[in-house]
Each structure stands twice: as C-alpha cells, then as structure tokens.
Image (cartoon, rainbow, N blue to C red):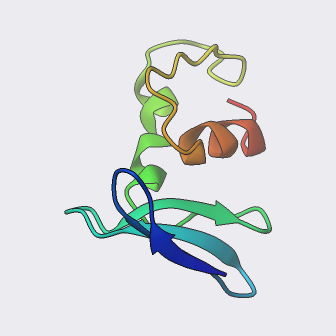
Amino acid sequence: MYEGESVYNYLQVSQNDQRVVLSTNVLFGVLSIYMKEDGLTGMYYDYAMAAPLMVPQENNRSMDVLILGMGTGTYATQCKSYKL
C-alpha cells in the first residue's frame, strides 16, 4: 500500500485479506498489525492480552487498562475488541 521514508525511519504498509501491517527498518521489523476481523495477531501483542488473567480478582471482565505510550494502537485495539 505504501513504501517510503519518514523523518525517523523507512516505512512500509502492506495488507492481505486478514491484516494490515506497518513495518520499519529498525530492530523489531513489524511495528503494528491491524486485524481486519477479530482474531489474534500471531505476534508479541497477543502475550500482553493474557495480562488480565494474571490479576487476582474475581471479575476480570470489567477491568480498566492504562496504556502508557500508545504507539500505533495495536494493543489498545485488541483490548477494545476483547472488551478488557
């Protein structure tokens, strides 16, 4: 979809039937993934989704989540999709 230089990095945005991926030329490679339909990304973001299950609380379905440093919003989008 897009490939070019920003002030900070080389950027590439690509998509397929399932997801849109933002990549850079830095160490991490894939910076963000947007899933077009509900589902896990298959990346490290999915591990963070297990965090509410580790909180000793009776009703972890109605938790507030504080995200410091939104980045590209992948984790926030997942939290909204899975209603954390």
Relative to 43, say whether 57 is above or below: above
**For the point 64% across and 16% down, which residue is it?**
63
The quarter of the displayed image where residue 54 is located:
top left
- Nearer to me, 56 or 67: 67
- Nearer to me, 9 or 31: 9
The x, y position of residue 66, in whole percent, is 53, 16
Relative to 18, say whether 27 is above or below: above
The quarter of the displayed image where residue 29 is located:
bottom left
Residue 68 in sight here: yes
The x, y position of residue 10, in whole percent, is 37, 68
Where does the N terminus fall, quadrant-wise? bottom right
Relative to 29, say whether 47 is above or below: above
**For the point 67% across and 74% down, which residue is it?**
19
**For the point 62% across and 21% down, which residue is it?**
60
- Residue farthest toward the bottom in the current orientation of the protein: 16
- Nearer to me, 58 or 20: 20
Where does the C terminus fall, quadrant-wise? top right
The quarter of the displayed image where residue 16 is located:
bottom right
**For the point 40% across and 49% down, which residue is it?**
47
Residue 12 in sight here: no
Relative to 62, say whether 39 is above or below: below
